[in-house]
């Protein structure tokens, strides 16, 4: 198992991250490096400038199996965005073991295929709960019945604008009630 740390151009990070994800690896850490000592020539010189600009850099870290290490290193090297003279760096170190933080189980044989980090799950939009669905249907009905008036008098051009108008129109009332809690509940509960 190898730990790979690489200095890459910040603009190339999304491309490298996507390619590594397609191989089944996730980047553990990404840090933006602020004090870059790598310079590039500016296309147009500015007054009082040396004609050089610093290249924004990032440092990425990931852990890969020994058998995939060379392939990952080649990928990062090709996609890092550095020319030969600019000197991008890849640091490789040996990993001895991996410890699961929940169970504190130590994995010495880290070459197993089941160690690959699972790809990040895509977040699915949750289904609307019945009350939300009922509210949207009611709002849609009101919008359909009053569409012309809403467009001319309130400058509401679409259903989504109408929903936003309803929410934003009611927010000041909610904020006022939250600041003065007795208005909302009247403190009918007493002490528990």
Image (cartoon, grey):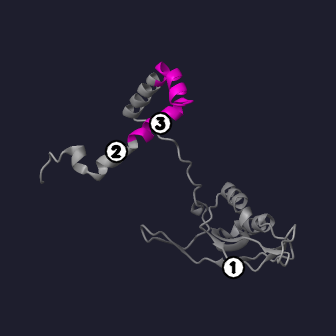
Which numbered disc flags the more N-terminal residue, 2 or 1? 1
Q: Residue drawn 35% across and 48% down?
A: 175
Residue 160 coordinates in the image, percent (x, y):
53, 34
Q: Residue drawn 84% across and 71% down?
A: 46
Calculate the distance from the C-alpha at mark 1 to the C-alpha at mark 3.
46 Å
Comparing 158 with 104, the one in front is 158
- Marks 1 and 3 in Cβ contact (< 8 Å): no
Q: As displayed, is residue 71 above or below residue 38?
A: above
Q: Tell us which disc is closer to us: 2 or 1.
A: 2
Q: Residue drawn 44% across and 23% down?
A: 142
Horizontal arrangement in the rendering, residue 17 relative to residue 161 (left or right)? right
- The residue labelled by disc 2 is 174
- The residue labelled by disc 1 is 35
Q: Quadrant of the C terminus?
A: bottom left
Residue 152 included in the magenta stretch of the image: yes
- Secondary structure beneath label 3: helix
Q: Which residues are magenta?
A: 143-170
- Secondary structure beneath label 2: helix
Which numbered disc flags the more N-terminal residue, 3 or 2? 3
Horizontal arrangement in the rendering, residue 104 relative to residue 31 (left or right)? left
Horizontal arrangement in the rendering, residue 192 relative to residue 54 (left or right)? left
Which numbered disc flags the more N-terminal residue, 1 or 3? 1
Residue 120: image quadrant is bottom right
- The residue labelled by disc 3 is 165
Q: Main secondary structure of the magenta part?
A: helix
Q: As displayed, is residue 34 above or below residue 19?
A: below
């Amino acid at each position: 198992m190898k730990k790979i740390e690489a200095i890459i151009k910040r603009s190339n990070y999304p491309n490298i991250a996507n390619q590594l994800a397609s191989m089944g690896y996730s980047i553990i850490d990404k840090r933006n490096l602020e004090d870059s000592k790598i310079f590039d020539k500016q296309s147009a010189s500015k007054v009082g400038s040396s004609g050089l600009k610093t290249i924004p850099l990032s440092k990425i870290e990931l852990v890969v199996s020994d058998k995939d290490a060379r392939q990952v290193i080649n990928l990062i090297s090709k996609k890092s965005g550095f020319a030969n003279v600019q000197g991008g760096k890849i640091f490789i170190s040996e990993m001895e073991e991996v410890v699961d933080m929940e169970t504190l189980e130590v994995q010495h044989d880290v070459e197993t295929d089941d160690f690959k980090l699972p790809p990040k799950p895509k977040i699915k939009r949750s289904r609307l709960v019945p009350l939300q669905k009922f509210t949207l249907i009611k709002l849609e009905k009101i919008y359909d019945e009053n569409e012309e008036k809403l467009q001319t008098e309130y400058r509401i051009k679409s259903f989504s604008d109408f929903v936003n108008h309803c929410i934003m129109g009611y927010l000041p009332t909610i904020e006022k009630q939250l600041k003065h809690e007795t208005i909302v509940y009247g403190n009918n509960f007493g002490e528990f």
